[in-house]
Amino acid sequence: MSSAPTRFHLRAPYRVALLLALTASMPATAQVTSDPVRIEQSVRTLASDLFEGRAPGTRGEDRTIGYLVARFQALGLEPGGPAGQWVQKVPLVHTRLGRPRTLRFDGPAGAMPAEQAKDIYVSTIRPDDSARIAAAPLVFVGYGVTAPERKWDDFKGADLKGKVAVFLVNDPDFAAAKGEPVAGTFGGRTMTYYGRWTYKFEEAARRGAIGALIIHDTAGAGYGWNVVVSSGGENYDIVREPSRLTSLALQGWVAGDTAERLFSAAGLDLAKLRVAARQPSFRPVTLDRLSFTADVPVSHEQVDSYNVLARIPGTERPGEAVMFGAHWDAYGAGKPDAEGRIYRAGANDDALGIAALFEIARNLKAAPAPKRTVMFAAWTAEERGLLGSEYYATHPVVPMAKTVANLTVDILQTAGRAKDVVLVGAGQNSLEEDMARIAAAQRRRITPESLPERGLFYRADHFSFAKQGVPTLLSMGIAGASDLEQGGTTAGQAWIDVYTGHCYHQACDAWSSDWNLGGAVQDINLIGTIGAELANSTVWPEWKAGSEFKAIRDKNRPAG
């Protein structure tokens, strides 16, 4: 649908003393100092109706890419994409479900119609003209985890071919009561990757299932049903070879109350099965005499979307790169909200992150040229499953072994200056010490994320790099209640509650005169300074013992 206009191919207190000792090899680097007025101007532009909600493969994307390239070029950066271009093409398949011809469960008492977005929410990433499932048996697979290193297997060899797998959201530790054998096996309340919906769909497909449904509950998912249904039946995936297409004709969610009725119809007690699924002895349970049938038209197209890549070349080690990233995409047009707004433009998520990249780039370009190359990436299709960053991470311009670190900005709090900075994914890598040291220089302290069970570490573009062994750091304002200078953590939590409860992925994620960018400026300066230091050092951040990503980096450790 979208093509690359020729303009895209332009070539042009903490124990501070201890922390300082731990990072003694870091050079003295000018601190990044961002300008809230410039940030506001960038956000207001990107979140304006001109960009039509910045959905991949739309006119809004064309305008967004042109704007991003022009801004990076005006800042004096060089193209950072393949073959000296400003962009990297990301071939996507875009699907959208039509009005279902059939969408129902069948049980002992007869047909149980399922209404899309009310009882279930499904989509597809297969480029087929219709999604068809004919009276497929349903199999409850608990949390759907296969983790040999944790001595855990929910499947026990069950055959899922041609069946619909039904999962619980999150992972077994999430709801474990104190004293249960499982407690701690999956990190306590901290979500592991096994708890992510992406993992569950991938596992169902690996086992040949024709469909996959996750039972929704707000606490386990970390967001309400309104967020689940916000994509309107559309989906995206990277274009894949036919042999690598998912087996899932439909994938998605089933509402909690609907799931209870289904299990009851099969003579099962879902509450008791939730408890059973928290034991390593759990075995899959077939929902006897219950099946799922669907016949839904699908429109599909290949969309050439684009990552925008810019760089400041290094003077001494140009082959090594420090990367800053944020995603440019949002959700495009949708149904009018109460104020008549149709564009879900993501002013905070993540136009504010893009504005942060501009500010960091402006600072670094004004400073003496860095010794390592600094890359700036504006990713496509983050909201569709981290697809733009995944594509780059598997088709990199700078090899992953030579990528020093990835520093990602995705949602910043807009309620004012804070006395702390929230750390996402504590215990992963040495960048956390850098964060603590720079935060201390700002007279701030580190606060661990307040709801690690939401798995935010796996829900932003930095994760695409972590999977390739690159140490990462994520700046995300909804990871925990900031201790605000005005109002403390009560005010910080109130901001999170309003944003995530009403505006996350909705049309009201728009620029507001109520925004106070003091805290966002603090976080931008912090992550920018960390990157500036790395770009002028010989330091290679390290994964900590116990991190699931350490072995990948160790295997591909750069020489010298």
Image (cartoon, rainbow, N blue to C red):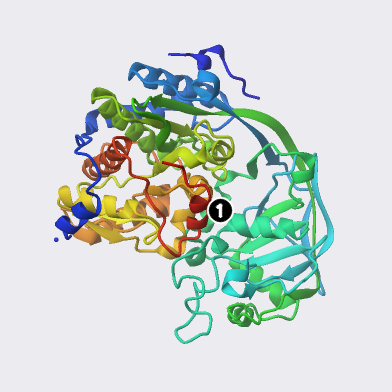
The quadrant of the image that shows the N terminus is top right
Residue at 27% x, 60% y is 447
Residue 41 appears in which quarter of the rendering? top left
Callout 1: few (<14), some (14-19), or many (20+) C-alpha neighbours within 10 Å? many
Q: Is residue 18 above or below residue 246?
A: below
The quadrant of the image that shows the C terminus is top left
Q: Is residue 229 left or right of residue 141?
A: left
Q: Position of residue 71 (x, y in %)?
A: 37, 21
Residue at 59% x, 67% y is 256
Element marked by disc 1: helix
Q: Is residue 73 left or right of residue 505?
A: left
Q: Nearer the viewer, residue 311 or 18?
A: 18
Q: How many numbered circles does the render carry?
A: 1
Q: Position of residue 448 (x, y in %)?
A: 32, 62
Q: Is residue 501 left or right of residue 120?
A: left
Q: Nearer the viewer, residue 522 or 361?
A: 361
The residue that disc 1 covers is 228
Q: Nearer the viewer, residue 545 or 14?
A: 545
Q: Is residue 391 visible?
A: yes
Q: Is residue 420 visible?
A: no
Q: Position of residue 527 (x, y in %)?
A: 30, 43
Q: Nearer the viewer, residue 242 or 327?
A: 242
Q: Position of residue 212 (x, y in %)?
A: 70, 59
Q: Which three-letter amino acid code belongs to the residue tagged 1?
A: Val
Outermost residue to the front:
560
Outermost residue to the right:
134
Q: Is residue 19 left or right of residue 342?
A: left
Residue 429 appears in which quarter of the rendering? bottom left
